[in-house]
Amino acid sequence: MRISWFIIVLVVLFTLELVGPVREYVIIPFTGLIASVSAFVVQIFDPTVIAHGIVLQDSVSRIAVSIQPGCNGVEAMICLTAAIVAFPASWKSKFYGLFWGFIAIQALNIVRIISLFYLLQWNKEWFEWAHLYLWQALIILDALIVFIIWVRMLPEDEDNDEDEQTLIPQT
Amino acid sequence: MSSKKTLSVKGFLLRILIFLPAAFVLWYYMMPAIIYLVTLLSKSVLLLVASNAVIDVEQHGNVIHVVTKFAKSATNTDSLAFVVDVMKYAYGLALFPAMVLATPKLWKDKFQDLYLGLVIIFIVIIWGVTFDTMLTLVFKLGEGIGEAMGTTAFTRELIALGYQLGYLILPAITPIILWFTMNQEQVIKLAPKFAPKKKVKK
């Protein structure tokens, strides 16, 4: 495990996330896509829900949630990417890990958005609690669990270019 | 921080399902004590970095009130105060202990990890509260306050950046990075090619 790689990838990706043009042309459109997908999923069982931009709204009660940076799963994805890139595995395995990790994190994130949308209509206090504290912890924990499952599922005999003996930290 | 115990995915998942709800309940009921400590620490920091704007930091239930030197209005000379929600920076105090308790390690090592991790998470909370306060002072309380505090365009950018780091990024990633760093040996051994080879009995 190369902890220096982990930190470098983490710093680079978080810096990119905070850069204005990246936020404008990547993060916000991506957040809008998450809102649209959430609306699509909700509309399967509740056709009164609509999405416009990053807002998910009930067309009857007019109650809406706005999906802001921090609620789009990007931070969890960045952590997972840094951990996978830093781990000694083949690039093929890393690609699979990133792909399935993205699916797992965004699937849970859509559950988060939908649950918060209905929680807000039921009780604002519980919404705040779940939004600000509980789901934040669960999404980042999801990234960690995806990572350790990916590590566990790595093939035993795969090749990689790194010197395995130097990767296990000596304590 | 080595341990002879080995991490298993199923065991970790099962234990985190038990410990995380318990940790959140404990975290909620301990919040007054946590906020008391955060109030003391953030008051020291804010009186140091924003002495020209902040008079006092007070605990009110599960939030803190930052009292400023500025008057509410020309006709009302009461001090302008605002609320900072500490809890949104502090969920790592529930998440990290749950992760440590769910990890198979000697109790001595767990306490060592908890001690170090909680100190770092408290630093992250103080960072969040400090930049939240600075952001409110400079951008939300009204025109002229930022200038009265002597901020420049560059320092205002730094405050906005510090706030984003302190709200969006650090509270979420700190518990994970701490756990990852403290348990990297165990995580590596999860991979089949690095797993300790079982001895075959003849």
Image (cartoon, coloured by chain):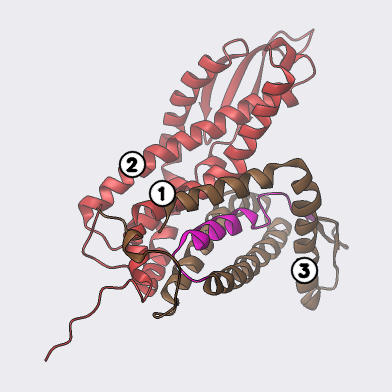
Q: Colour of chain A?
A: brown
Asked whether the viewer can see residue B25, the reply is: no
Graded by Cα atoms within 10 Å as few (under 14), some (14 to 19) or many (20 or more), the crowding at tag 3 reads some
**Residue A11 counted in the magenta span:** no
Dot 2 or dot 1, earlier in sequence: 2
Amino acid type at mark 1: Leu
**In front of the other: B169 or A152:** A152
Asked if marks 2 and 1 touch (Cβ < 8 Å), the reply is yes
Label 2 element class: helix
Type of residue at label 2? Leu
Image: B89 above or below B67: below
Chain rendered red: B
Q: Chain of mark 2?
A: B
The label number, if any, that marks residue B67 in the structure image: none
Secondary structure found at label 3: helix
Residue linked to disc 1: B178
Q: Residue B21 in the image: state x and y as whole percent.
A: 44, 59
Chain for disc number 3: A
Q: Residue at horizontal 37%, vertical 64%?
A: A163
Discs 2 and 1 lie in a common subunit: yes
Circles 3, 2 touching at the beta carbon (< 8 Å): no
The spot of residue B131 in percent (x, y) is 60, 29
- Camera-nearest label, 1 or 3: 1
* Residue matched to label 3: A37
Magenta range: A64-90
Q: Residues within 10 Å of mark 2 (few under 14, many from 20)?
A: few
